[in-house]
Image (cartoon, rainbow, N blue to C red):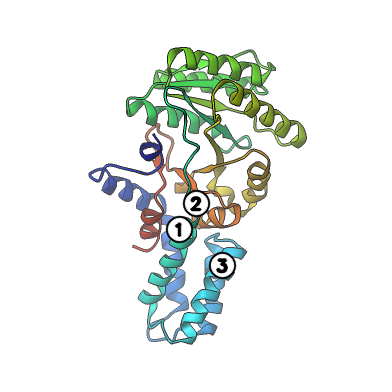
């Protein structure tokens, strides 16, 4: 599963994924490339002063302050040694630095015990596309011939339960639910018991995304984790945080709260096609220390793409 679900793609499929990634980051690429070429005009020596001018460009693409400063410092060292001769060389070195950051956070989910369901806990604030992402992920897994069960454990919002049931109908996936206001851990217990008895491959769990009661929310997530561990060894095997790419740096603080408290092992970045600041992918990897697993590039069920760091940087600097 791990290889199939999180990045190991059939070689014949890869070009199509790369093409879709290029399309998704078009606005970011145009913004970044155009500004780099403005800063580094034809024939201009690339020195520390030039790289200082590049800082605003990288920040404008939402790479974040920490990431931008680290990347520029490495480029300044190369500029001092006259190792950056032209704009093409600058872009190549930028690609290398960004790829190194993305690869540094590469990790895999906890391996499941053979014969038991793999449990994927999905967390994130309301409005990021969390429930929609769950539906798309179910579609991805079912298209690979896997059996999937959805668990509607966001019992705080009746609309979330209804939305998940709609995705269940679209994808032909059963949804285990309870009434609005019910105990999330209780419905999770029911879902995991059902999945275990049926030898289901995957259980994808929706969770509450409210922020106004941070302590209660995190206590609720911890209770759910304990419930999962009692029923299935090693569960949850993956905890995915769904983030909205269009919120950029503003979403990082909320993301830190989840990564610190909820044991997040991977990021799903939605709406990547709707922003010119796709550099936030790099900021997330560097500042949260968590790999991006998937990116959302549209509204359809097939618009959830496995994230490949090399494809991403190649798409930024075509």
Q: Which residue is mark 1?
A: 28
Of badges 2 and 3, the one in the foreground is 3
Residue 38 appears at what percent x and percent y? 45, 75
Q: Is residue 130 above or below residue 278?
A: above
Instruction: Give the SS element for disc 1.
Output: helix
Residue 198 appears at what percent x and percent y? 44, 13
Q: Which residue is mark 2?
A: 275
Do labels 1 and 3 touch, CB within 8 Å? no
Seen in the image, is 111 located left or right of residue 184?
left
The quadrant in which residue 304 appears is top left
Q: Which residue is mark 3?
A: 68
Image quadrant where one finds the N terminus: top left
Image point 49% across, 86% down: which residue?
80
Q: Earlier in the sequence, mark 1 or mark 2?
A: 1
Seen in the image, is 264 located left or right of residue 90?
right
Residue count near mark 1 (Cα–Cα under 10 Å), binned few <14, some 14–19, many ≥20: many
Image point 37% across, 81% down: which residue?
86
Q: Is residue 163 above or below residue 288?
A: above
Measure the C-alpha gap from mark 2 to mark 3. 19 Å
């Amino acid at each position: 599963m791990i290889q199939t679900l999180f990045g190991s793609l059939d070689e014949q499929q890869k070009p199509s994924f790369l093409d879709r990634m290029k399309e998704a980051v078009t606005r970011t690429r145009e913004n970044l490339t155009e500004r780099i070429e403005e800063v580094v005009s034809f024939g201009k020596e690339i020195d520390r002063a030039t790289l200082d001018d590049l800082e605003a460009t990288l920040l404008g693409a939402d790479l974040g302050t920490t990431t931008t400063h680290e990347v520029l410092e490495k480029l300044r060292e190369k500029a001092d040694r006259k190792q950056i001769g032209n704009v093409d060389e600058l872009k190549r070195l930028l690609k290398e630095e960004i790829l190194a950051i993305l690869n540094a956070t590469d990790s895999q989910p906890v391996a499941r015990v053979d014969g038991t369901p793999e449990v994927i806990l999905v967390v994130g604030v309301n409005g990021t596309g969390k429930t929609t992402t769950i539906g798309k992920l179910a579609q991805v897994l079912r298209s690979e011939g896997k059996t999937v069960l959805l668990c509607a454990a966001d019992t705080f919002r009746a609309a979330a339960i209804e939305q998940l049931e709609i995705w269940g109908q679209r994808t032909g996936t059963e949804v285990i639910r309870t009434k609005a206001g019910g105990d999330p851990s209780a419905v999770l217990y029911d879902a995991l018991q059902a999945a275990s008895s049926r030898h289901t491959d995957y259980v994808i769990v929706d969770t509450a995304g409210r922020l106004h009661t941070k302590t209660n929310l995190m206590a609720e997530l911890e209770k759910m984790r304990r419930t999962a561990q009692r029923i299935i060894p090693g569960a949850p095997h993956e905890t995915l945080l769904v983030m909205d790419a269009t919120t950029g740096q503003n979403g990082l603080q909320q993301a830190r709260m989840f990564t610190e408290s909820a044991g997040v092992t991977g990021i799903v970045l939605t709406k990547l096609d709707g922003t010119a600041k796709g550099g936030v992918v790099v900021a997330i990897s560097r500042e949260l220390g968590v790999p991006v697993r998937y990116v959302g590039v549209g509204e359809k069920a097939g618009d959830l793409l496995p994230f490949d760091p090399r494809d991403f940087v190649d798409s930024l600097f075509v």
